[in-house]
Image (cartoon, rainbow, N blue to C red):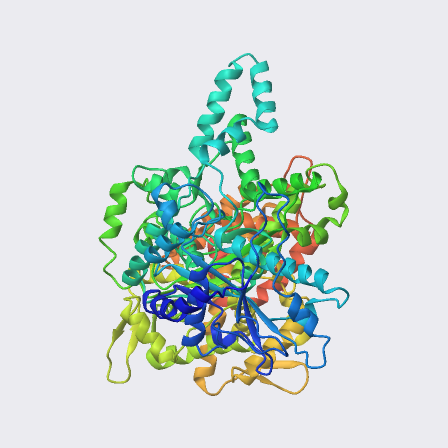
Amino acid sequence: MALLHPLKTLLHAPMTRLIAAWVRPRLIEPEPTELGLAPDLPVLYVLPRPALSDAWLLAALTERHALPRAAGRRRIGALRPPACLALPATRHRLWPRAARVEAPFRALIEQLDTPDGQPVQLVPVSVFWGRAPGKRFGFWRLLAADSWRLTGRLRRALSVLVNRGSVEVHFGAPLRLDELVAGREPARDDRKAARLLRVHFRRVRTRVLGPDLSHRRTLIEGVAASPEVRRVIDDLAGEGRFSRERLRRRARRYGREIASNMTYPVLRFMDGLLRRLWNRLYDGVDVRGLAAVKALAGDHTLVYVPCHRSHIDYLLLSYVLYQEGLMPPHIAAGRNLDMPLVGPLLRRGGAFFLRRSFRDNRLYGAVFNEYLHRLIARGHPLEYFIEGGRSRSGRMLPARPGMLAMTVRSFLRSSARGQARPLAFVPVYIGYERIIESASYQRELHGGRKRQESPLALLRVVGRLRRPFGRVAVNVGEPLPLDAFLDERVGRRWREAREEQPDRFTDLVQHLGETLCRRINAAAALNPVNLVALALLATPHHAIEARLLARQLALLAQLQRRLPSGARISLPEGTPEAWIDRALALEAIQRREQALGDILLADPAQAGRLGWFRNNVLHLFALPGLVAFAFRHQAAHRLDDLEALLAPGWPILARELMVEPPASLREALVAMLDLLTELGLLEHDGEDTWRRRTEPLEAGECLDLLGQLMQPSLERGYLLLAVLLDAGPGRLGADELASRSRQLAERLALLSGRDAPEFFDTRLFVGLVEGLEREGWLWRDAEGRLVHDQRLREAALRSRRLFDPALRHRLQLVVRREGEPCRADTARG
């Protein structure tokens, strides 16, 4: 249906100017200059439905951005169609015999076969005046013209007045009409073109608005009445402790405790509030990698799995997605956040709350599983933190299986019924230059109790918001479609299976968690603070010459530019000197002026905070740090010897730091050795031998600082192996081994003056034991105790060559028991 009519034509020019002066679009995607229009073909714009306000706004935007005009008519062969078309409104059910309304492309299709026929570019355009999901909001529903329900003229006019700053315009990729049609029958090709465009508009609408929202009460009643929940109620009632009616009331109460209540007014309010907060708190928010997510959002259920470093994560990701034209997700939040004032606001912003543990509460578990399944089955975007809690050490924590297992079960349950909507996990790395919880993290790492969240605690945090917090990065990793992951891990048999879970389900979920953690880490953001932390904390006394620090920062950045340790990592702009100034401005380090050159240093409190930022990105330097450490004590290595030295421990180190091991360690070593040679830190003798450079002296210092990054991880591995080999096979269980190793690590930290509680984190030693078991170095006997053979002892003796005699002696003293030398160190390799 053309949008032109004598009266409409008369009003077009003044209304276009009025709209141009009144409306300030919040988002235009993509940028008009990036549309990629063919300059030699005419352009027609297509709207999803007739709407004068959309046509006037589009005409104003095309004129403002120097695009082919969306006003007037186009000369296409012998035709003069309107420059802006609209798909016809679908027939109303009350008048099923109404005449079929044809799509507006038939004449254009017919002219393609004429001598002067000309191909046409169609540009689909979606305009959203406000972004309310399909749900009734009283008066606010009048102001949010774009919901899943069609809007009337009065409501649209009111929305144009109110939503002048909340308008989004989404341009689709240009489509050539001659490539859309089959050339068989114009009427059929006309309907085909319209159908393809409707699919496009529906995908964009789903991406922006999300699925239609049910009323919260209706959803809760549906969950409580579901077959799965009723089955649990029947089982519990059969035990005779509670009546069925009482259990049904309890199920509904659990549903109210859990369910979110996302509302458009709160989304609008939070958008404005958070925009002001970020402008006050941060110098900017850098977002990278969302293009791949937008490509999936129209027809996939998206599950965002960000790393969890701060309470700010909840708000930041939802804000970014809303600003980028994506529907904010429903967020799984701990019940501890459902506190007065804050909890209701979060719930209306999309948060749903869960208890930390409900293994012993079958009814609660059934209600929560059913609620989550209904969100997933209907295509609502979700967000949860697979680490389970915020990382106090700054490392990526191992994924917990709970939410991942429930998500996979829900997907398999829908697949078994033939109702599965494609689902994709979206890993997200969030990187800060300064965090609000810094002081509390340091207190907890030193043994302090975690303080309970409360509105009063929130007010105390608000008082610290006047400090500079730098920039924050939101890097989106490579999305992981769940069906492709299942195909790879268990084969295609899961697609035909009628059961809800494949064999070895626990292993599958564990591997899924590890894969997502690695993809999060592969999208890490390097910034001035964590780069300075990497270099400064590698020095013995947390002090370094400004000139050497700048050189080391340049080295770290160059390593990631040339051989990046992640597919989607980002580097800061500017020079090393500017990065140092940035760290100084954020009070992360101090400068001491000296006549011979300035010294940069960190006091104990600053060093503790810097340790958190170093751990954010330490994984990016796992392989270069390990290679550099191998040259600290031994000046030269042949390639074969270096590979034999590093190969046993590399998979375990990669697993601890959650990085993807290279397909070939040998090839990765050659590439790293060549790069370190090119950067002036090593020398290559032309054969298979590389050696340390003796000149200039700074080359050796930079190599040692790089190797120092991996020394804590290697020391932990040395201590654990020493305890294990000293006890002998079949003497220790996994928990006992991890506990003893942790105690030795704490002792080593105290003796060496290292104030780094994360060095003796029990979870790191538990992960080491699991890594040794995964690689086949350890296994368990019938009583669950750890068993090993001579291979492990020989590998441990070889690894001793990595450590210089002084460091080896210090580690041996720590492991010594009751005056007896540790048997692991009695042999001399």
x and y percentages locating residue 349 in the rendered image: 39, 46
Left-right relation of 603 to 216: left
Identify which residue is drawn at 44% across, 84% down. Answer: 697
- Quadrant, the C terminus: bottom right
- Quadrant, the N terminus: bottom right
Identify which residue is drawn at 72% across, 60% down. Answer: 188
Q: Which residue sits furthest top?
A: 240
Of the pair 309 and 701, the residue shown nearer to us: 309
Identify which residue is drawn at 24% across, 84% down. Answer: 595
Of the pair 724 and 282, the residue shown nearer to us: 282
Left-right relation of 38 to 357: right
The answer to whether residue 286 is above or below residue 378 is below
x and y percentages locating residue 143 in the rendered image: 36, 50
x and y percentages locating residue 696 in the rendered image: 46, 87
The answer to whether residue 243 is above or below residue 571 is above
Q: Quadrant of residue 236?
A: top right
Examine the rendering and report whether any part of residue 324 can be seen: no
x and y percentages locating residue 266 in the rendered image: 35, 47
Count of marks overlaid on the render: 0
The answer to whether residue 643 is above or below residue 786 is below
Q: Quadrant of residue 41?
A: bottom right
Of the pair 467 and 783, the residue shown nearer to us: 467
Left-right relation of 550 to 226: left
The answer to whether residue 380 is above or below residue 674 is above
Examine the rendering and report whether any part of residue 390 can be seen: yes
